[in-house]
Image: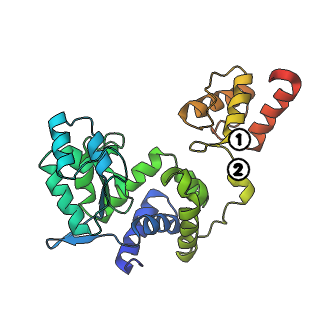
Amino acid sequence: MAFSKEVLKQITQIAKARGIEPAALAAVVEVESGGRAFTTIDGRQLPLILYEFHVFYRWPGLGDTQRKEAVRRKLAAPRWGDLPYATTQKARYNQLARASRIDPQAAHAACSWGVGQVLGENADWLGYGTPKALAERTMEGLDGQIEVMLRFIERRRLLPAMAAADWRHFARIYNGPGQVDHYAPLMAAAYRRHGGTVTAVPDEDRLLLRVGMQGEDVARLQRMLRGQGFSLVIDGDFGPATERQLRAFQAEQGLEVDGIAGPVTLGRLEALAGRGAVA
């Protein structure tokens, strides 16, 4: 589904105001939203939502009685997939209304909101304070929806990936490691369709190790860092702890401190390992 000219115009205006290539922002918004910016509920234009039963269940502010009542009413479940998603926006907003009668903050935390499909439970992390406040911002219009999405993108340090048209890295962090092959091609195609001008990232550059990546290559990086005296758990998960220690190594070695293990950083680690610094 394609956006209207008015929606595309607004996306372009927001992108330019934020120093983002319009085609990159349009690509992400289009893919994440499926090309729909609004739904109409009781005559009012509202953001699209998806109600997540397991998120309501795990909301820390819920009491046992509330949680049991939500489970009884089929508004909460211990695990993702225990209950099927509602198939229409009207039904999802109905779930939100019913859940709000049990606990309004848990209900709004359990929904993903707007064109970025950002979960309400991220509200405090994103600076909105409460899930309901985050939801209300998305209800103010497309600018509010995109603001919430961009805050999430910024907090996950994904603006450089957007600028470089590195859609595989973007999808890995935004959508999850198991969703890269689905979302990255969609974003790349949308980016080209919207007139993107940045050449796609070459395959070899996608092998750069950075936050969000997992696997044996990350475990090897962690082992080499440990061999240089940096304290790390070798779990193959490139999280904040690995990034901090990598930055410390780069600073110690006089390298560019970017928290990314590229050819120069890996080459230095391998050279040190080759001198016997690493077993």
Residue visible at 72% across and 35% down?
220
Q: CA distance from mark 1 to mark 2?
A: 9 Å
The one nearer the camera, 201 or 257, is: 201
Above/below status of 89 relative to 129: below
Place of residue 278 in the rendered image (x, y in percent of width and height, measured from the top left): 80, 24
Place of residue 120 in the rendered image (x, y in percent of width and height, measured from the top left): 30, 49
Marks 1 and 2: CB-CB under 8 Å?
Answer: yes
Quadrant showing the C terminus: top right
* Residue wearing tag 1: 217
- 88 on left or right of 63: right
Location of residue 29 (image quadrant): bottom left
Residue visible at 51% across and 69% down?
23
Q: Could you tell me the amino acid type at mark 1?
A: Asp
Location of residue 30 (image quadrant): bottom left
* Closer to viewer: mark 1 or mark 2: 1
Quadrant showing the N terminus: bottom left
Q: Could you tell me the amino acid type at mark 2?
A: Leu
Residue visible at 39% across and 55% down?
149
Question: Does any portion of residue 133 appear in the rendered image?
Answer: no
Residue 207, which numbered label? 2
Place of residue 34 in the rendered image (x, y in percent of width and height, measured from the top left): 41, 70
